[in-house]
Amino acid sequence: MRPSGRLANQMRTISIETGFAHHAEGSALIRVGNTEVLCTASVENRVPPFLRGKGTGWVTAEYGMLPRATHTRGNREAAKGKQSGRTQEIQRLIGRSLRSVVDLPALGEMSITLDCDVLNADGGTRCASITGAWVALRLALGKLVATNVLRQLPLRGQVAAVSCGLTAAGPVLDLDYVEDSSAAADTNFVLTADRRIVEIQGTAEESPFTEDSFNELFALARQGVSVLFEAQTEAVNRAENR
Amino acid sequence: MRPSGRLANQMRTISIETGFAHHAEGSALIRVGNTEVLCTASVENRVPPFLRGKGTGWVTAEYGMLPRATHTRGNREAAKGKQSGRTQEIQRLIGRSLRSVVDLPALGEMSITLDCDVLNADGGTRCASITGAWVALRLALGKLVATNVLRQLPLRGQVAAVSCGLTAAGPVLDLDYVEDSSAAADTNFVLTADRRIVEIQGTAEESPFTEDSFNELFALARQGVSVLFEAQTEAVNRAENR
Amino acid sequence: MRPSGRLANQMRTISIETGFAHHAEGSALIRVGNTEVLCTASVENRVPPFLRGKGTGWVTAEYGMLPRATHTRGNREAAKGKQSGRTQEIQRLIGRSLRSVVDLPALGEMSITLDCDVLNADGGTRCASITGAWVALRLALGKLVATNVLRQLPLRGQVAAVSCGLTAAGPVLDLDYVEDSSAAADTNFVLTADRRIVEIQGTAEESPFTEDSFNELFALARQGVSVLFEAQTEAVNRAENR
Amino acid sequence: MRPSGRLANQMRTISIETGFAHHAEGSALIRVGNTEVLCTASVENRVPPFLRGKGTGWVTAEYGMLPRATHTRGNREAAKGKQSGRTQEIQRLIGRSLRSVVDLPALGEMSITLDCDVLNADGGTRCASITGAWVALRLALGKLVATNVLRQLPLRGQVAAVSCGLTAAGPVLDLDYVEDSSAAADTNFVLTADRRIVEIQGTAEESPFTEDSFNELFALARQGVSVLFEAQTEAVNRAENR
Amino acid sequence: MRPSGRLANQMRTISIETGFAHHAEGSALIRVGNTEVLCTASVENRVPPFLRGKGTGWVTAEYGMLPRATHTRGNREAAKGKQSGRTQEIQRLIGRSLRSVVDLPALGEMSITLDCDVLNADGGTRCASITGAWVALRLALGKLVATNVLRQLPLRGQVAAVSCGLTAAGPVLDLDYVEDSSAAADTNFVLTADRRIVEIQGTAEESPFTEDSFNELFALARQGVSVLFEAQTEAVNRAENR
Amino acid sequence: MRPSGRLANQMRTISIETGFAHHAEGSALIRVGNTEVLCTASVENRVPPFLRGKGTGWVTAEYGMLPRATHTRGNREAAKGKQSGRTQEIQRLIGRSLRSVVDLPALGEMSITLDCDVLNADGGTRCASITGAWVALRLALGKLVATNVLRQLPLRGQVAAVSCGLTAAGPVLDLDYVEDSSAAADTNFVLTADRRIVEIQGTAEESPFTEDSFNELFALARQGVSVLFEAQTEAVNRAENR
């Protein structure tokens, strides 16, 4: 029995609110249960130095957590003067995941920065960030098409992420904080709507696990992301039809 | 005529939503027109080293702005590795302003950290932070009384802030971003509900101004904060009655 | 009765020694009682990136305190690896104050950096810095005119600063360290010789104060700066006649 | 055909030299082809603050690369003043991987720091680090047993790592630099000698891949680590018998 | 012929003014020609962690240069966020030099920090710092004896420093900036009044030099420091007799 | 009697292995007894900003120590976020020493960076670094001649370094760690093969020493470097003949 009473293969309630950030070219406030992340996409007419003059674009991500997004207040990274290893690991993952579905040469010499800021944390913030960032990115690209900057969406598909783990209740989908902090192992799956793999990060600090367990987690993830792809699609449609 | 069509002495629409941050002892999401700040109050059972063993409490503040709270994306301070002078100036102001109405010895050896994070910026973020932080602080103190940690609220009154400035439309109340960036001079007033002064910060980089102009700005501020005190009171009542 | 025996409206002894820094285009070693600040003006033939090609100049300031300018030794900011919030707040104030009296377009694409380094501290260091920095700036501009780099002084007037506060002896002018550290409230006034306001920073951390008190402090400040304007004028005359 | 002429399932030549670092409690200079990493294990009689008094030990890792371990010189992280996100990500991975096979309570209140410094880089440095760090750790623990600090090895097994990827030559084992920089996708497998999973990190920045491809990579990794486990065992035996 | 017209073995004019820093336990404003350094000695009742409980004292030094002490303005180290290698090298030298003449166990568990801040630079700032710091230290120790904190001066002698170099005018004593920046080689000699060596730092970046040249420089230094020892003694006598 | 049983004028065993770093234009792994430093020379086709367009080259050095090169583990400088004063002092010394024998204009607008990383430390790491860096530099320059980038070696000679000190066993050559940490004084001599002086750094923190002692140390150093020059020559010959 899971602490939340959910079934093993049951996602938390998902909602995606677009347009929360007034100035961003695209934005999505995603809620996965009590985890809440504000994702914005910012378009700039330049690329980082290593890409200048190569006729290709860039997509990158930054991640942050408000100091009191968590049960006890965490130190503000800006005040400490550096981003933690965890923060950097997460923002690199978000950036790679989104780049995997963007046709960078088709984007041309523009950069899109995806900022994912956690307002409330209850487990799964990196997965919610990837899922929400895709919506922010999609809306920003849509605006570039609508304003004739681009002819068509330089997007190869849809990407979303979910974490699964081995808990006292067995293998379960979409870990919340209580589950996450006591799981023997957990794996983040970043998958595409056409059933391919973008990233898999499985970790078993507590106790190494078997290939069979891994396959069970993978099957759960397949179910989870299908819910997320629907929520993304619906949010984009809602935003573009108003 | 003001760009927004407002009267010279007209505040923008105010709303204060409490409880937005799930984990904080007190929180307020304040909206002043299109400026939106999430304020949280975090209580800890310890004081900074310079106060240890003195039987008195502490209240401090930190301020931040999400990278895309603004028209064009700003660099993330955590990534740059330091807080700007502007950020530090603002968070010091918020801290002093709130301490001025707290009875620190009555608080006892506890600290309250007020985090003010700007989600959307349209001028007046430091004033909105002070006004919202008071609500977050008040709710956190109320919880300490409700749980018998404190016998009564260690609070000497109510504090709120508003900016006034000399613009093309003359002296006006509650500058938005367009007004703020072209004002000849502007002044932030941090005032108490019993009509006293906590902080006054008047700045005339463009062109020094007269004492008469200053007095006009002060009179506008008096009107503005009365609206804010009502909004604060109503938000606290709403939060504590539910 | 004030600790120093001064009258409520009595400034400390003022002296301004020019030319102390051998290499600077302008320099002033200002003494206000036992507070002593070395102010230098450095001219450079370039402006910061955000002004390049705009045909206008820039004036900025940096502030520092020698580690043993104070009663007990403070940590060296260069060794700590960052400037405190207080330092940044002060240097931003000095920069804004001096820019308010400079005709930046008339200066042309040049920068002037005002360095204010406190050699001995006894209260009022930011005010002494502004007052001394004006002399250093004025001498540097005079040298640009004397060497035909500029046709005339790009200066709109004279600026000086003084702090007033509410102490046990009532409202008093020009706080020294003992008064400053026990004042219920204090206000820094940055004023021009033509009786206008550049900056007002009033702070009442201990206990909010009334508008009447504020007006009394303002009246004292008016008296104080008239003494400073004379000292500035005399120092400039002395320097340029030798 | 692979650039090196190796078969798809062929590892590079492995050698593990122990005792290279004179002072460390355990050390291994591991060579995987032209990749060369010096791994040291340092034992200290204390644990980090968050573990004090809990009767349990700690294992952590740090990773670095000499500036000219690579084709073109990289900047020294100590000179830049911070570790890159890549460095932090790798050292966190090494730490988690080794902790997964250590019985931390049995270790008692001691810390072991594993330093992995790359002397020559030709792809696969993080995997070589994990494999070599296990030997350094094993030797340090052996010394604690030999000196009666511990009764028995607090070790639950053997861990090693290898990367596999999808290249122009199809799925291949143990990528070198040339392969790594052009692979469509690559996955690092951290596995135990009893055939369980510690970490899996699959990345497909270029192009998402199928579950079948993933399974092929996994099968190759199984073959690869069996070679590494042998090399580890042999190195430990050689070291402890002399 | 030297640029200044001085003889090869002629020091610049020396003056040492004590008491310039009001708060320091000892202070000396030393002028060696146009080089001017403010040296303060600050006494604290504690030692650094590595000496706690060992019954011995500590002497350390910090060095800084005001941004406009030089011909063109240098960046402020506090603003850059770090001390340069040159600064650290100099302050380590000053600290070692002064410690060499202090009886640290006789000082007891107290620290003395010597701050040397260059107000005007014209070559030889590190040597002037050492020479002036000895006076500040001596006065601070004298005060500890006068107030019965110590029974006698924990001082083994007098230390001073001078630089000599190989210039177009041959080997010369006490280089000024013009000479220093074009010398083929220069050497700093830190010597004691009883004719012993504390530090010798000879550098020949431009062109390696012979042992004979070195011996000539050494002989000049012997002459130079005898002038400095007299100036130190006189300054201390003047300070303690008033 | 020296702890190692060596004679007063006896160097430790020297070995210099070239080519250890696969990618560097020149590399030398130097062993002086148990001290072991990996030195690499990296050639780049550009110079630092202050030399651009001046038609001259640059040689610089960086120094580091692996965390467990020492008896007890030291903190990693990259993790601490800054290089210690000691590190900066040493790398500046290495850079100056090597520049003294390079004909920078003949090198043309190229930079050579010498990285000296200590793998095992047993005293004398800065001297071993200089001696080994010369070999790495020499090989890199040789490669530039061999590939017709330069017509001839822009090298004015050979440089090597050794430390001598006053120990319980009297003045001795080539201090190891045990001797170094208890010596009353020690001096590093950086000398050329044509018997000239590049750098002398004598330090007597414990107790100032006489000119006679200094001369004895100098004589020992002369003997020591002659051994080093031979080892350098032989290593270069071995490397270039294969």
Image (cartoon, coloured by chain):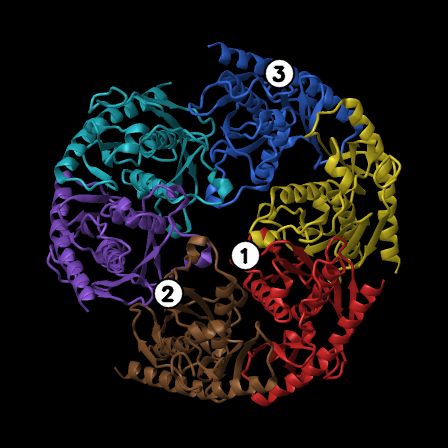
Chain colours: A brown, B purple, C cyan, D red, E blue, F yellow
Residue where numbered disc 1 is placed: D53
- Mark 1–mark 2 CB contact (< 8 Å): no
Residue where numbered disc 3 is placed: E229
Query: In this rendering, is residue A113 above or below D171?
Result: above
Q: Residue at x 17, y 40 (%)?
A: C209
Tell which subunit mark 2 falls on: A
| Label 1: element kind | loop
Q: Which mark is residue D41?
A: none
Side (left or right) of E157 relative to D28: left
- Residues at marks 3 and 2, CA–CA distance in whole angstroms: 64 Å
- Mark 3–mark 2 CB contact (< 8 Å): no
- Residues at marks 1 and 2, CA–CA distance in whole angstroms: 29 Å
How far across and how far down the image is residue E18, in percent? 48, 18
Tell which subunit mark 3 falls on: E
Both labels 3 and 2 in a single chain:
no
Where residue D233 sits, quadrant-wise, is bottom right
Q: Is residue A180 visible?
A: yes
Where residue C189 sits, quadrant-wise, is top left
Q: Is residue D68 visible?
A: no
Query: In this rendering, is residue A140 above or below B121?
Result: below
Q: Amino acid at mark 3?
A: Phe
Residue where numbered disc 2 is placed: A69
How far across and how far down the image is residue A221, in percent? 48, 85
Both labels 1 and 2 in a single chain:
no
- Residues at marks 3 and 1, CA–CA distance in whole angstroms: 57 Å
Tell which subunit mark 1 falls on: D
| Label 3: element kind | helix
Side (left or right) of B96 relative to A129: left
